Image (cartoon, helix red, strand yellow):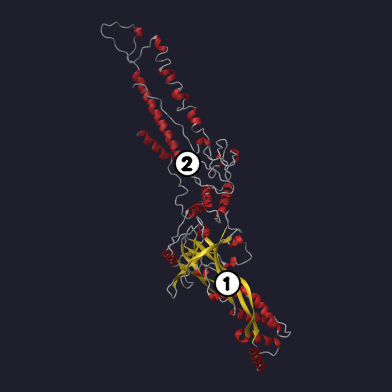
Amino acid sequence: MKIAAGAAVAMAVALPALPAAADDAPDERPDVPVGTWLAARTQPAVQLTSFTYTGTVAVPTSTINQSAFNRLVEQATATVASGKISSDERSIAKWLFQQIAADVDTYLASTTPERTVEAEVGGLCTGWWVTPDGYMVTGAHCVQVGETELSRLFAQQALAKFNQQDAKEIISGLRGLEADEEIVKLAQQIYVTFNTNHMQLRNLKQSLSVVQSLPGGGVDKTAKPVPAELVSVGESYPGKDFALLKVNAQQNLPTVPLGDDSDVRTGDTLYISGFPGLVTNTPFFSLESKLEPALTEGPYNAKRTTQTGVPYIQTQAPSYHGNSGGPVFSKDGKVIGMLIAGTVSENGEASESESFVLPVGIIKEKLGEKNIKPAQTTTTTRYNEALNDFFRHYYSDSLPKFREVQALFPNHPYVAKYISDAQQAISAGKDESPKPILLWVLIGVGVLVTAVIVAVLAKVLRRRGRRRRHSEPSFVQPPPGAVQPPSWRQLPAGQVPPPAQEAYGQGAYGQGAYGQAAYGQAPYGQGADGYGPVAYNAGGYGAAPHGSAPDHAIPQYGSAPDHGNPPYGSAPEHGNPQYGSAPDHGNPHYGPGPYGYPAPPHGQAQPPSGEQTRAVRYGQFTPPPNDRPS
């Protein structure tokens, strides 16, 4: 008991404070800006969505209503005579076109032939995954359009060619008058209005999709629309502007967690993630740029309620066309609402000071109606842990977690880039990963073992000393009358007379107890448990280094492809051939245990490694046998 207590004290002195493990408080935000942290964590779950309508657009041919047009000419003559317009032909033509454009059905009539064209219209919005198996939340106005708005979209998309042709014909009737830009615009406006009013849509079909990257990872030009099914849809703004989509054959998708309405209040900073149309609709940016969400932030201004009793949050976080349906986050990374609307100026530009957010309480209500429970899988958990390590410069710690994410979800849009960046940082000597706590425990165990060995040796040596003293005979005074030995053979009390001649041969002091058996080759010589080469050389500190796991190798001890050191090993997959070249299990010295993983084929994800442990063996000690009587 005294020895164990002493060893415990020795270990406590040797390890006054162990460093915190890398996974302590894994979700605590690293020392980076909130926006940086939020964007990295949430962007994988935020996706670009699209809705598309296809159909046949039919419009009649138009003709001038001659009687009505003649009356208009008479009005023009009277107006010129009164001096209200100039008498030149250009001024008269402009006045006529303005009057026709204001009341097209009075001056134009439908006739044959009917003209048709196949057309497609659509829009882009933002959505976000709430379950790993493919349920997505977005806005109601992102999945359906009213009849009036749909007709306007088709008119803009499909009728431009017809409008231009009809305008040229009416201008040609001006009898040689050269039309300026103003006259051309007036003529086109006449037919934009007429053709839109008389347009018919046939064979109308709708489709919804989510833009995803192809296997291999990375948001790049390989992205393609994946069909989505409309599960539920509410009323467009100012109603409960909510829609639920389902993309089939999905698993391990990254998701974002839902918060509560009470998580934020007036004055808090809100963060909006989504795809602004000013980027996705411009030809100047690459597809890679268009498929990365933008993050904006601004204060929570006030809570509003519509006339129908639907709550909305007003915020100054900037938003634009295309941001609709995007998640809105608190500083803790939880969804507190969804961006739905914003006011626009007279010229159609968004007003950055007035964005309106549907609270998360409504979103939860709508999900509950369909019995959909938001969930988070290992993909998101590991990715968030890896990001925290990455931002703390724990690059070696982050790599196995990033690789696990890549294995779980090969389509992950950002993990491949993080793996590359982490590898480059390690190569540049920027890795600050702390040593795993198990290594410190092993060091402490070494101190404990050493203390135990020293204590046991001291106890054994003291016991031998006592045995030796007890085994030596004492001089006994002869009884009265006995013949006294010669004076030269008398010894002081307590001393042992020299043994007889045969005692110095093969007996007690020869080859027996104190010869080759006790102090010879067994306990303290070359035996398996002693202090010879077997214990402290081949078995203990003289053994091979501490392993060569591909993801956690210390450069001087291994040569894994990403982090190795060529001088110490050239095995392509598993570190140092000097200490083991078994292809699947790291270092054969330590066996096929948990310290080695098979390296994956090139291009595939690295399986997750365990804790960064080092296989350290310590020499065993067996005290000399206690085979003598006390």
Indicate which disc residue 455 carries.
none
Q: Position of residue 123 (x, y in %)?
A: 56, 68
Q: Position of residue 321 (x, y in %)?
A: 55, 69
Marks 1 and 2, how far apart in space? 70 Å
Q: Quadrant of residue 185?
A: bottom right
In terms of secondary structure, where does tag 2 sit? helix
Indicate which disc residue 203 carries.
1
Q: Is residue 268 left or right of residue 63?
A: left
Q: Relative to 574, does residue 264 appear above or below in the rendering?
A: below
Q: Residues within 10 Å of mark 1 (few under 14, many from 20)?
A: few
Q: Position of residue 1 (x, y in %)?
A: 35, 34
Q: Nearer the viewer, mark 1 or mark 2?
A: 1
Q: Quadrant of residue 530?
A: top left
In terms of secondary structure, where does tag 1 sit? strand
Residue at image location 47% in from the left, 48% down from the top:
22
The residue identified by callout 2 is: 439
Label 1 is placed on what type of residue? Asn
Q: Quadrant of the C terminus?
A: top left
